[in-house]
Image (cartoon, rainbow, N blue to C red):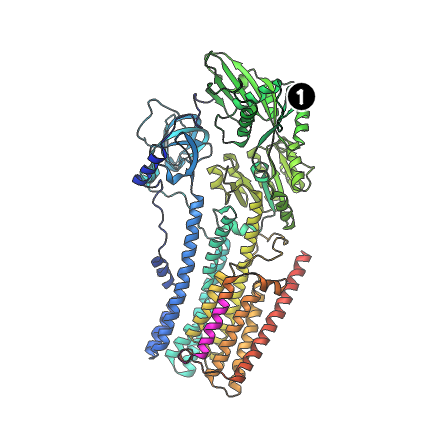
Amino acid sequence: MANPPSEADGDAGRGLSEERAAERLAHDGANELPSTRRRSWLWIAADAVREPMFLLLLACGIIYVLLGDRAEAAMLLAFVAVVVGITLSQAQKAERTLDTLRELSAYRAIVIRDGRQRTIAARELVCGDLIVVLEGDRVPADAVLISGTSVSVDESLLTGESAAVRKSVVAPTPERMARPGGIDLPFLFSGTMVVQGKGSARVLATGAATEIGSIGRALAGVSVEPTRIQRETATVVRRLAIAAVLLSAIVALVYGGSRGNWLQAILVGITLAMAILPEELPVVLSVFLGLGSWRIAKKNVLTRRLPAIEMLGSATVLCVDKTGTLTENRMSVVTLSAPDGELCRCDNEATIPDPFHDILEFGVLASHRDPFDPTERAISDALEQRLPGSEHIHRDWVLAGEYPLSRTTLAMSRAWVRPEERLWVVAAKGAPEAIADLCRFSGDEMAVLEKRVSEIASQGLRVLGVARARYRGERLPEAQQEFAFQFVGLIALADPVRPRVPAAIAEAYTAGIRTIVITGDYPATAVSVANSIGLKNADRYCTGAQLATMSDGELAAMVADTNIFCRVVPEQKLLLVEALKRNGEIVAMTGDGVNDAPALRAAHVGIAMGARGTDVAREAAALVLLDDDFGSIIEAVKLGRRIFDNLRKAIAFVIAAHIPIVGMSLLPVLFGMPLVLLPVHILFLQLIIDPACSIAFEAEPAEEDIMRRPPRPVDAVLFDRSLLVNAALQGTIVLAATLAIFVVALAIGRDERVARALAFTTMVLASVALLFINRSTGGSLARVMRARNPALLVIGLGAFLFLAAALAIAPLRELFSFQALHGRDFAMLAAAWAISIIGLLALRFLSAALSRGRRVSA
């Protein structure tokens, strides 16, 4: 039973004024702990200069100075400045993205100011604020409880004790906080979790002045943990780095031993190391995952854990709540049912007959006075609108006690004291079967009620039972079952389906994703809604009572082809998730309550409700659905697939672009030919590769068929055989064309500087072609070219202009060790470029055909 009085949702006082709160916020500062500072550009630059590529460039510059080639050294430094500038730009963009995500994931607080309840960012709380704390919320500041209903708090964050601590109101209200620990004290500590009940409290300390602030722990923030693909990429980069060191040492020894120029040999070795090192890959991953989280957040889905982005593309099952996710959570009372079965429509302007007045009256008395819950708000609005100013509205009654919902009784009761007499009036509402149990229905009465509820619920309506009781005594009983309740009637409420849901359900099926509806509603209500949204097997359902009696084997068989689970309590969601996982499904699960947290944590992708969810659910989840809309989940799945798809394209481009660089750095040394690539050439190519793979491919639109593909296997690796083979073949085609024009130019007597210019130009043009060809792994090339991607056009145009300048401007030609090209040189270029394009296009069409064949066979 509740501690009387306990109207924590608005009656505890007016709170601070907005003006006074603003003054205190300006004076005391924000209610937040000192956190890790945002990295400055100097910090990012310091990280950049510690990268292996920068150190190699520095070594090259020193060698050029020793060789007396100061112009070459200056050019290297200029390129280094550009590369560091690109790194700074990308890193700062990622930092801004993380800042945005931290703002989105910041805790909220319900505060009473100027007598009105509103939700604000917890950082805006000030000392003296009156806050409302509810079950499942994290306490936003150190505060003292001034009224409460069965409040228990998990203080393990501060005390290490796992057992919840009961809180009680004391008089007079303390003005200073005590230390954590102890039962029946009024102190609530910032960062602790309300696991039961609700109450109102006065803020006594904020920010660093709180208990947790004095200990110096940091709590909130976006989790940045290494993902599976980050670990996979780190392994690849580490192995390539080892290979680069060994191979560069061997090449330097071969060059020095055969040509006798050891300083030049060191330069050749460094050049090869620069060619092999795929330093772009870690940057690509950081940019893709950071910007991917930001893009998903723009679709109203907040990413709390980065691995969720990977798992989204693998999800095979979406387990969703009905209310608020598939529906708008905008309740309205449409039908009332009297105890004798007579019905009254409330969605028209007709007068409500007298026998139905008590149903609305006691429905409101069983609700909170200033309700946030859409169901209670709908009942309250119906009474105010249909019976304004009547004797059925009791604003002067005083709440004496409350009996909340429990796992065993899906009904709540509230006891009221009438001012004119010492009599408790008790109102109850809840699941019809729970209300019938409180009213001690016989078996025949229960059967009649169930039939009536089924008829109403088959229209897609949510049905609640209402009961009343009178009680005289010295004190209220401990349990609501001790009252002699009388059945008052039924309330049926409509909650319209969200407009986007039917199309989103259909798109999910097309993408190979099955949707399962898990609800506490009556079976007929769930079936009606399932039919309206296009859910498959909508005529088959399972109830929570049936689940409770099933063995593991029976449960596995049930979840294999049942898409509706109704009258389910939150604890049973975990059973469903575990059963689906045992069946090999990749499960995404939505939830909003405290008891949903285990299921959210167990699911491969836990999705908490942002608008109506508790802090416990949000912390357990990997994603937070900011608008509680099912359509946003499907948008997030689509974006998750796009991110992984574009990441593969970027990596394929990086590998393909590096193969000709490595080949043209290594082969001339091994076969005694003039050197083709110097550090300045590799830096030029990096100016194409770096922004292309981290900016252009990240911005690439999704493929047309991305939601017509089956879910990606959960164990799919980023560097799989098909990607590596295709990228290697692309790189080999470019290498062959580059090597061919270099060898032919030397064979017909062209100067090595001309041959170098021809080879380098072929490589650059082919790399730009690779950019556009790798935009799509299949489909119409014409459609791909029409798709907007301004970043790609800018990079391609910039490469052409820079290359033209290096070929046309004499000082730049000298720095690049080129000679001017003439008519037949351009003819050779055109031929080599055409051959490479034909080869790349033929490979693309072959790869697309093989990919379609694999999907069909799968």
Please, is residue 294 above or below residue 594 in the view?
below
- Residue placed at 56% from the left, 78% from the top? 830
For disc 1, the marked residue is 342
**Front residue of this view, candidates 666 and 319:** 319
Is residue 673 visible to the viewer in this orientation of the structure? Answer: no
Q: Amino acid at mark 1?
A: Glu
What secondary structure characterizes most of the magenta part? helix
Residue 308 percent location from the top left of the image: 52, 49
- Residue sticking out furthest to the bottom: 749
Q: Secondary structure at mark 1?
A: loop
**In the image, is residue 775 part of the stretch drawn in magenta?**
no
**Front residue of this view, candidates 119 and 57:** 119
Please, is residue 26 above or below residue 484 in the view?
below
Residue 821 percent location from the top left of the image: 49, 82
Q: Quadrant of residue 319?
A: top right
Q: Quadrant of residue 53?
A: bottom left
Mark 1 Cα shell of 10 Å, populated few (<14), some (14-19), many (≥20): few
Q: Is residue 850 left or right of residue 595?
A: right
Residue 498 percent location from the top left of the image: 59, 40
In this picture, which residue range is highlighted in magenta? Answer: 795-811
Please, is residue 851 above or below residue 273 in the view?
above
**In the image, is residue 804 part of the stretch drawn in magenta?**
yes
- Residue sticking out furthest to the front: 349
**Front residue of this view, candidates 850 and 255:** 850
